[in-house]
Structure formats: C-alpha cells, structure tokens
Amino acid sequence: MHPTPSAPALPVHTRRLDLSVLLEAMDPDADPVHRHLWLIALLEWIRGDTHATELAPARMDIFLDVVEARPELAVRLQVWWRTLIESVDGTTLLSDYGFASRNAFVSELVERLHYKLLPVSPETTDASELFSLVMPSDRDAQWLAALSEASLERLARLLSAPATGHHVQAYPTLTYWQNTLLEAINFCTSQIRAAGFSPEIRLRMSTPALEASPFHTLSSDFDALRDTWLAQLDGSATADDVQHAVQHFRAKLDACRHAAATVYTHLDAHGISVDLVFRLRQLRERVLRIRALMDCLLGEPTHVNTALLFSHLASVGQYQRSLRALFSHSTSLLAAKVAERSSEAGEHYITRTRAEYRAMLGSAAGGGALAAVTTFLKFAVMAVGLSAFWYGFWSGLVYAASFVVIQLLHFTLATKQPAMTAPAMAAKLKDFSDASALKDFVDEITHLVRSQVAAVLGNVTVVFPLVVLLSLAMQLLLGRPMVDAAEAAHVFHSLTLLGPCLLFAAFTGVLLFASSILAGWAENWFVLHRLDSALRYNPRITRRLGAARADRWAHFMRHNISGFASNISLGFMLGLLPAIFGFFGLGLDVRHVTLSTGQLGAACASLGWDVLRNPALWWALASLPFIGALNLGVSFYLAFRVALQAHSVTGLGRVRIRRAVLERLRQAPMSFLRPAKDDA
C-alpha cells in the first residue's frame, strides 16, 4: 500500500492570503480541485477589497513583476497553467457561458434558482463553472476592462501555450487560445443554425427572410473562413483572402440576425410568447458572442479584445444569477403587448365631449343598477351560513357573473377604468417632445379625471337608492330586510374611516390592476394560439354551429375575451382572497367603492330613519370618497408605471408635467369635473 500524497499547503478557507504564500503554495502536480482553489485565491488577492477594485490592475502588475523577477517561478507557473487548461474545457466558457442549456424560459428559471440556492463545487472540468467561482463579484468586469495593454501583453507572453489536437501537425504555430476561439465560434455557429431551423422560429419568419435562407450556409461559410485563416499561417493564403472571408461570414451573421428579427413582426400581430422571445434573445446574443470571439481572433490589439471579452463574460455571470433580469428581458415584449391591448380598450373609457360625458353617466348608472342586484345576491350567499372558503367562492362567482353582465350590456363599473385608461395615456407620451404634446397630455388628464368622476357618481348615486328600495321591498314581501341590525352594525364597523378600510381599498386597487394584466395576457394568449381562427374554421365546430354562427362566435370572443378575463378574475379575487388571507391569519379584506356603497344602503334600510342619529353612519359615509380615490388611484398608478416601462418612456420631465397639471387646475378647476361648453 502506498501512502496517499499530501494535499498542497494552500488552505481551503476563504481568508485572503499574502502573495508570497500563494506563490509558494502553487503546485503543478496538485489534484484538480486544489489547482482550482489556488486560482480562486489568486484572483481574490488581485481583486482585493471589493469596494476598491480600481486597485486590481496595479495588483496584477505586482503579480507579474514578482513572477518575471524569478525565472524558476515563471516556469513553474507556465507548467501549472498548461496542466490547468488541459484538465478543463475552455471552449464551453467561450461559447456557452451565459446561455441557457435549454431554450425555454421555465427551464432557465429553474437553472437560475439552482445557481442562487445551491453551492457550486470547484471540483469540475467545466471552465464555465470554474469561471463563475473565480469571478463572483459584480466589480470583476470593471477591473478586467481596466487592465492596461502593456499588462495584457506581459500576461499573454507568460501564459501562451501551443495548441493541442488535430491542427497541431499542420499548423505548429497555432496557439491554444486561437484554437479554442475557433472551436467556440464553430459551436456558436451550430447553435445559431439549430435555433434558426427550429419550427417555432422558422414558421414565423417573413417570406423574404425564409427564401433567403441565410442559416443554411452559415456553417459552410465559417468553415471557409477557418480554412482561409489557417492557410494564412503557413503562407498559402493572403491577408486579403482572410479579410474577404471575414466580411462574407459577418454579412451572413447579420442576415441570420435580421431574419430572426422578422419573427417579432409576427409576434406583434399574432401575440407574444415568452418562450419564443427568450429563444430569439438567445439567438441574438450568440451572434454578438461570435462577433466578440472574432475580434479576439482577428482584431488588433488582440489582447485588449480578449480582456474585453472576459469582462463581458464576468458581467454575463452576474446576469446569469439574476432572476429579475430574466423576468425583465423575457417579459418586456409581453408587457408591451398587454399595455397596447389595454390602451386600445382604454380609449373607450375616456370622455372628451359633453355628449360622451352624458353617455358615461348613463352607462355608469346602468352599472350601479346591476351592482344593487349584486349586493342583494352577496347578502343572500352570506345568509346561507357557508364556511369561509365556500362563502368566498360563491361570493366571487356572484361578483364575476355580475361584472360579465355589466360588460355584455355595455354598462360601466367605475373602478375598472383606470387600469385600462392608464396605458392609453402612456401611449400619448411616445411623442412627448414639445409644449403642444405636454398640453395634449394635460388635456388627457382632465378628460380622464372627469370620466372617473362621472363613472363613480353614476355608480354610487344609483346603487344606494336601489339597494334601499330592494331592502324595503323585501321587508314588505318577506317581513325582513336585506340584513338584520347586527349585520348592519358590522357593515358600519367595516366601512368606518377610523378602521383599516383605506388599507383594504388600496389593496383592492392592486387587485383591479392585476385583473387588467390578466385581461391583457388572456387576449394575447387567445391571439397567439389563433383561437378566433379555430372557432371560425375548425371543421368540428362549423359542423355543429354552422359557418355563419361559428363566425359570429369567433368575432364575439375576439372582442370580449379581454373583458371576460378581467371581470371573472376580478370577481373571484374579490370573493376568494379575503378567505384565503383569513386562513393564514392575515386579515386582509377588500373595499370596492360601488359595492361598499350598496352594502351601506342595505344597512341604512335595515335600521330606518334612526340611523341618521348614528355617528357610525357618517364615519362610513366619510370613508366612501377615500375608498373610491384609492381604488382609482392605486390601479391607475400601477397600470401607468407598467405602460411607461412597456413603451420605454424615460426622462419624462415629471416636474414639467406636475407644473402643467397644477397650472391647469389653477386656471380651469372645473375642467377636471365636467366638460366645457365648447368641447368638440
């Protein structure tokens, strides 16, 4: 039995070591994991204090000075380096680092969760995993890019190694780095071709891009470039030949990128797929990676391009760990499409003339009448005495059915407006560049505010008296009002301004915003899967319904799917979420201005005229304007923020907008409440 060789003297803890200790601990014969630990410790020393990474280039120079001053140390470092590069696959670092192993959003999400939650072992042959351990800081990209050209040349002379593999015999001057670059470009080229040939992307390309078929010859074009460049090494090709091959390959890369970009036009017209957007972004990034690799191989100075490449890889490593970046980049187009579809619907909720204002009042009055029936049904469900969950479920079903009926009758529920109108207003800010655009935007604000005022007034002024009349009718016909005295007292207590009802009203605004997002997503999903076309032309459906009726159903669903999704989701959220939060002991409830007004009307009818002497009534009445303002304001604010992000609107001059609005409020305050006589 032979004794197990002892490990190198390098400690495995993370305390930063002195440079002399590190250099003495360098052992070319160490096992792979201790070689990797030594490299991690060396880069820790070079990086130094993570808050002062500008000193890292100077530390790199110190390291090079010490190594170059001791020839035996330089030789040992070169042997150590060649042993390292022979034990890890550097091609994967250059070609695959920062890219998803599977071209799917959910798979990449799971992989990033693994990166965040599970530790990575330095015992690996994958250069990508080793690089993530060696470059863990978000400041590594900065100091790598800051290395001087002189330092990079010294480092290249020290670490230069001959190539290994099948090219060595034919091209003895080929270096390991050049060979690795060629292999990495080859791998990236294959990945781009595979993505371009996938049916999800190929079938959505434009006809000219598909006919040009740049993906078919991409690999052969790179083979021609590689052969020409290698031929230059032995003198059988000239620099002009290489330049011609490079230009041809770059042009083919651009053609592939432009062909893939035509898919976005299809997505814009037929709905956004997050997975497909993710694949297109991966394809685009691989094209850019090939360009960076070609700069390292062909560009001058090559050492500077190499440092910039590794700086980029360090940044990619930070992005690869970020869940927020993944969601932001992959869902940006979906957010834009959701906002666009919401803005199309939102235009119908903004009144600009007196006739439109009166029509809004009438539509809101119809919504208030149906809300009175909703209040009656809600108290009927409560009277059954169900458990919390089933009470929430049936209440949500009542709300959803009521909201859908309001939609189908073309009535208005006030609080549904802001989440739809905010994207319509944000769309106006695309051309926000001069005084006239600012004035038009302020005009839209006045139109929006008075539209909200009209809708709220139409709802609450109808729902309250109708609920009172319904309760009195029940008293006459059944001998009991809609709610008893105890329940009426509970209504007053739940709506008092002195309680948490304003917090609940703000939470309801969040739910209103969430329902609008679900509406936009549902419409995008409906269009993406071409369900309107399926309803119109599917043979089984047309046989059962007939062609004319199938066409009417397709048209009906295409124009109402967004409203159905919004109303049904809002109804069930208003009904079920309080029960779910109650199960977890959170006590979070909802307060909707129209429904709360109806409940207050039922409580007043139950207690009769004596209720006017009850202070709880006045506290509850005082809360209604604030409930309405929070319902409207929170949902509008959130929807407006999403719409601004979707339209990439930044630097809007918020101070200018605020001053313009305040100036309009000072000059014409009534324009925020009712349209002027000369409004056209």
Image: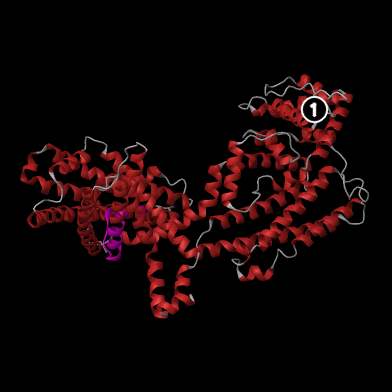
Residue at the location (19% across, 54% down)? Answer: 376
Residue 650 at x, y = what percent?
Answer: 47, 47
The answer to whether residue 240 of the structure is visible from this angle is no
Question: Magenta includes 664?
Answer: no
Q: Which residues are magenta?
A: 399-419
**Which residue is nearer to you in this view: 131 or 248?**
131
Name the image quarter holding the N terminus. Answer: top right
Residue 194 at x, y = what percent?
Answer: 69, 59
Q: Is residue 195 left or right of residue 549?
A: right
The amino acid type found where label 1 is placed reads Leu
Residue that label 1 marks: 64
Residue 382 at x, y = what percent?
Answer: 23, 49
Measured along the vertical axis of the image, is residue 516 above or below residue 74? Answer: below
**Which residue is nearer to you in this view: 393 or 560?**
393
Name the image quarter holding the C terminus. Answer: bottom left
Q: Quadrant of residue 523?
A: bottom left
Q: Secondary structure at mark 1?
A: helix
User: Farthest residue in the front direction?
Assistant: 1
Q: Quadrant of residue 283?
A: bottom right
Residue 328 at x, y = what percent?
Answer: 52, 47
Residue at the location (13% across, 43% down)? Answer: 485
